[in-house]
Amino acid sequence: MRYQRPRGTNDILPDETPLWNRVEETFRTLCKRYGYHEIRTPIFEDTDLFTRSMGEHTDVVSKEMYTFTDRGGRSVTLKPEGTAPVVRAYVENNLAAQGGLSKLYYITPIFRYERPQAGRYRQAHQLGVEAIGSQHPALDAEVIALAMHFYRQLGISRLSLVLNSVGCPVCRPTYRERLREFARPFVQELCEACQTRYELNPLRMLDCKREKCRALLHDAPDIIESLCEECRTHFDALRQYLDGLGIPYVVDKHLVRGFDYYTKTAFEIVSDALGAQNALGGGGRYDGLVEEIGGPPTPGIGFALGIERAIIVMKELGLAEAKREAVEAFVAALGEEATLPALKLLQALREAGISAETDYQRRSLKAQMKVADRLGCRVVLLLGEDELAQRTVTLRDMVTKEQRTVPLDTCIEEVLQTVRNA
Ligand SMILES: [Zn+2]
Ligand SMILES: [Zn+2]
């Protein structure tokens, strides 16, 4: 074969797209119900947007971005995540001026130069929401409730919601110091990445996946104990709301999330059906991000959920049944003379809202019936010499096996009745 898809990417074939559509439609329907409106932003942005918002020292920015110089000499980057572009659009288009809260949702591909493995792709797809304009913890509860509702709607059970607070610019520096102090005696034993994190971004040591680092950091000080008054009140209120909504969660002091812009609430949704890469998605609050990107100080919270990961879990749990939709009617034309009348009939059926197909390969009637059967057609309309001469059509009900001759002029009505009563 001369060409292959780029490493770490996927072709989503027609047998698979019904499942993708189901996932996306479920998300759209729920977003509408929760009052979120769709936003679409470009596939690429100025590189600075991501370096600035996610933080230079995060893995994504330092190792995984698809960054290139365009013909105008600008550095641009394929979006590695969905939040910064939405916040950039919020600021640039002054959505704040519309007053109140901006509740936005998106469905987007994201691009990261990752080592390909199960559930990780260089082009992956995410569903996300961003609620910008309120710091009330009730909004955190709504955002989390929406994410959990989404998975429930897809039938995915056995999920855990993992919750933490990562503090704010007031209390995080203190915690960072406590953490450094804790790790100082064994820095040399940590992995290379964690040694860098120790210097630049010590919180990230906490979510290192290496067994050795995990063991060393197991008894790291609890960030909750270092929270300032405001962060603590926020966290307590959120927990109360989740309890009240009947949404179970576990608090995990090691949950820090990847990017610098998170403040206060951080959460992940985890499935044991996903193995080691067990987060289906996650999110958190980013009260400093709008300002960082050049807008007025505005709090916000959001999440991003991986479509590929949801689909892996659905397959694992036997929830991935999604068939191609059946075609309702098949027009079988016999002989070259029937070609134009068949095309006209096909067009009339489609104009009437009926999905219809025909044979373009000049096959025998028997072969055409087989195709109609495979497509799941309820009705076959036969156009042969006799039918043409009498301006009729032979209508065969593929379920009852009944066959009758009807006038060509009124056959659409008959087809409609048959397929709509199915
Ligand atoms: Zn704080
Ligand atoms: Zn490590």
Image (cartoon, helix red, strand yellow):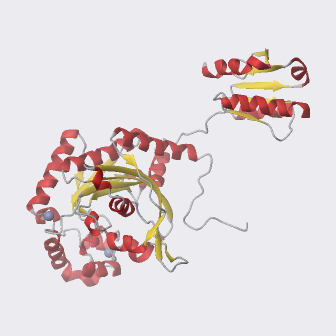
| Among the 4 quarters of the image, the one containing residue 189 | bottom left
Vertically, is 70 above or below 353? below
Left or right of 245 in this view: 361: right
Residue 119: image location, x then y, percent: 47, 59
Could you tell me which residue is drawn at 49 percent across and 63 percent down? 43
Quadrant holding the C terminus = top right
Answer with the quadrant where ligand 1 appears in the image. bottom left
Could you tell me which residue is drawn at 40 percent across and 71 percent down? 60
Looking at the image, can residue 260 be seen?
no
Residue 275: image location, x then y, percent: 41, 57
In the picture as drawn, the residue positioned furthest to the left comes out as 229
Residue 172: image location, x then y, percent: 17, 69
Q: How many marks?
A: 0
Q: Nearer the viewer, residue 289 or 167?
A: 289
Vertically, is 299 above or below 292? above
Residue 83: image location, x then y, percent: 36, 60
Looking at the image, can residue 82 be seen?
yes
Vertically, is 164 above or below 293? above
In the picture as drawn, the residue positioned furthest to the front comes out as 97
| Among the 4 quarters of the image, the one containing residue 299 | bottom left
